[in-house]
Amino acid sequence: NTTDDVTVLAIPANPVIEATKTVSITDNNGNGSTDLGDLLTYTITFENKGNVTLSGLTISDTLTDGNSQLLTLTTTPTFVSATTSSTSTTLQVSGVSTYTATYQVNQQAVDSGQINNTVLVTASSPGQTNNVTDRSDDGDDTDGNTTDDPTEVITVSNATIEVTKTAVVTQNDGNNTNDAGDLITYS
């Protein structure tokens, strides 16, 4: 075509989403340890690092103990805010959506010694369905694991036991002296 032909520049779609999950701990009993009754508040961010708008954002949050047994979040992920005109379900290019979730440490978590939390986010780019996903990173790249590592919290269990032993002497000979023939009953 030598006349009046349109100059076409193809821009390939590059859908990319990144999920990050961090945790802050409220020491409800004030003992300086993460243990029974303490509150974990998770901040979850989803960032559109691609070049197209992402929509239909869905979240699958998995919380497990140190034995890989499921735990239940106290509050499920709740939308807090977004940037660049993004929403809870649509991420504009460079947009970030923020959610929070909480977990109050129960005995199962304390007994296992650890709490692991990950989130899987799925979204759709224009003309596609659920074509971009990411598993959350803990936001700490200094730990040597820079992608898809769970947000881990170590719990402290201070296993203690107290034993008390008492004795009652029955005077079998009536002399009010603990001697041969008397009965000692231990509790």
Image: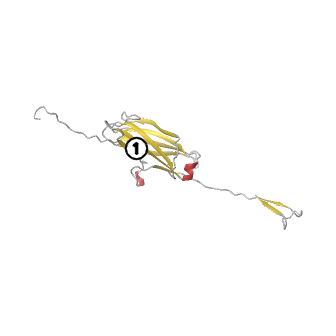
Outermost residue toward the bottom in this view: 180
Q: Position of residue 55 (x, y in %)?
A: 36, 36
Residue 57 appears in view: yes
Outermost residue toward the front in this view: 129
Q: Quadrant of residue 178?
A: bottom right
Q: Position of residue 56 (x, y in %)?
A: 38, 36
In the image, residue 97 sits, relative to residue 150, either above or below, namely above
In the foreground, 35 or 124: 124
Q: Quadrant of residue 168?
A: bottom right
How many numbered marks does the figure carry? 1
In the image, residue 149 sits, relative to residue 123, either above or below, namely below
Tag 1 residue = 19
- Residue drawn at x 45%, y 49% is 150
Q: Look at the image and tell me in which quarter the N terminus lies.
A: top left
Q: Look at the image and tell me in which quarter the C terminus lies.
A: bottom right
In the foreground, 24 or 61: 61
Three-letter code for the amino acid on which mark 1 is drawn: Ala
Q: Secondary structure at mark 1?
A: strand
Q: Is residue 12 left or right of residue 99?
A: left
